[in-house]
Structures are given as C-alpha cells and as structure tokens.
C-alpha cells in the first residue's frame, strides 16, 4: 500500500527508526535520548515557529513549521499515538466552535439548592391561650425523636 499523504509517509519512516542505529539515524538518536529530549525539541521548534511568524518571515515560518511537525510526530510515535488519533480528535471537534466550547468551559456553576424556609408559626385561634391545646402543626415531628421532619421539596426531596 502506498502512502499518498506525506505526513503518513513520514510517520511510517519515523516508526521504522525505533530501536535503530543512533549513529546512522537522527530519529533513532532522538528515540534513544528519550521522551524528555523529544518533548524539549518540540518546545524549541514551537518557539522558533512562533518567532518566525511574529517576525513576518514566511520562509522561516515554513521551515520551522516543518521542523515542528516532524518533531511532533516523533513525540506522538514515542508516546504510542498515531497521526490518525490526532485526526480523530480533530474530527470529533468538527463543527464545535472554539468560542462555544470555551464559553461552556467557563460557565459559572449552577446555583446551590435553596434551603426550604422554616415552618411558619401557627397562629393561635382567637380566645385560646398558650396553655391550651393547639391545632396540629403543619409539620409533624418524628415519632422516634420528636424532632421536626424536614419539609419535602417540590421535586420530591434532595
Ligand atoms: N523531516 C525530517 C527532519 N526535519 C528536521 N530534521 C532534523 O532535525 C534537527 C533539528 O535541528 P536542530 O538544529 O534544532 O537540532 P540539533 O541541534 O541538530 O539537535 P539537538 O542538538 O538540539 O538535539 C536537524 O538535525 C534536522 O536535520 C529532520 N530529520 C529527519 N527528517 C525526516 O526523517 C527521516 C528519517 O531521518 P533519519 O532518522 O535521520 O534517517 C528523513 O528521511 C526525513 O524524511
């Protein structure tokens, strides 16, 4: 099978260099140095890419972007990922505006549930003093503890 995408072809070559002769292959030497070194190269190339862009140097930007992509693929391969994994992630995001996604990320948390108000005092019927028996309370107490039970919420409880 032929690789028509140059990035796929490059990924295949990079993959084939794992465990190779570090004295004969830059990629094999990178793998040998380890993930921290590869990640450092990605960081350096990213900074150089950004500098070239800010300086408006299109030729340098093209070269640095190529260096960045190359080292990023080495890092992905070292981490056991494929370009197809990145493509799938980008496809998953297709159609989701970065502005919408960011707004959802920074949305304030929903308000805390409101505690029900304490039960209102039951007014005494006219002519009845405090010592006399009163009407049954709106809220019945627990038979076991005598403490008032919490009011049920409108939605059936918390
Ligand atoms: N696309 C590239 C590619 N892009 C950049 N580079 C190398 O990446 C290095 C980056 O340059 P720097 O000056 O930043 O790095 P450095 O100073 O050499 O490295 P450090 O001392 O910082 O570790 C250079 O040596 C470039 O030649 C690449 N090396 C290889 N490839 C591809 O990878 C394939 C396999 O390469 P080998 O494994 O070397 O056969 C090649 O056929 C190419 O297709």
Image (spheres, helix red, strand yellow):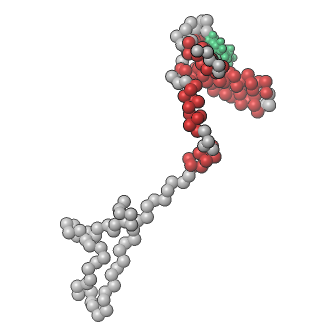
Q: Is residue 141 left or right of residue 87?
A: left
Q: Is residue 16 left or right of residue 63?
A: left
Q: Tell me what residue is drawn at x 29 percent, y 67 percent.
A: 149
* Whole-percent x, y for residue 138 in the image: 30, 76
* Whole-percent x, y for residue 10 in the image: 63, 17
Residue reaching furthest to the left? 144
Query: Which residue is nearer to you in this view: 148 or 83?
Result: 83
Query: Which residue is nearer to you in this view: 20 or 39?
Result: 20
Residue 30 visible, this orientation: no
Residue 146 visible, this orientation: yes
Q: Is residue 120 above or below residue 100?
A: below
Q: Tell me what residue is drawn at x 27 percent, y 86 percent.
A: 130
Q: Ligand 1, what quadrant?
A: top right
Tell me which corner region of the image, top left, top right, bottom left or bottom right, holds residue 113. bottom left
Q: Is residue 21 above or below residue 120?
A: above
Q: Is residue 54 above or below residue 39?
A: below
Tell me which corner region of the image, top left, top right, bottom left or bottom right, holds residue 133. bottom left
Q: Tell me what residue is drawn at x 67 percent, y 28 percent.
A: 46
* Whole-percent x, y for residue 121 in the image: 34, 79
Give the position of the N terminus as an image quadrant. Answer: top right
* Whole-percent x, y for residue 32 in the image: 54, 13
Give the position of the C terminus as an image quadrant. Answer: bottom left
Tell me which corner region of the image, top left, top right, bottom left or bottom right, holds residue 45. top right
Q: Tell me what residue is drawn at x 74 percent, y 24 percent.
A: 62
Q: Is residue 154 left or right of residue 97?
A: left
């Amino acid at each position: 099978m032929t690789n028509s995408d140059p990035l796929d072809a490059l990924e295949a070559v990079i993959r084939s260099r794992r465990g190779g002769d570090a004295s004969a292959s830059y990629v094999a030497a990178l793998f040998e140095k380890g993930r921290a070194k590869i990640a450092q190269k990605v960081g350096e190339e990213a900074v150089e890419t950004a500098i070239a862009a800010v300086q408006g140097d299109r030729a340098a930007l093209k070269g640095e972007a190529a260096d960045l992509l190359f080292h990023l693929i080495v890092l992905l391969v070292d981490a056991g990922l494929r370009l197809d994994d990145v493509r799938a992630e980008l496809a998953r995001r297709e159609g989701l505006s970065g502005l919408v996604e960011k707004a959802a990320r920074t949305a304030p948390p929903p308000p805390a549930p409101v505690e029900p108000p304490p039960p209102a005092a039951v007014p005494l019927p006219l002519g009845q003093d405090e010592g006399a028996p009163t009407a049954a309370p709106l809220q019945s107490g627990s038979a076991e503890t005598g403490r008032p039970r919490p009011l049920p919420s409108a939605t059936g409880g918390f």
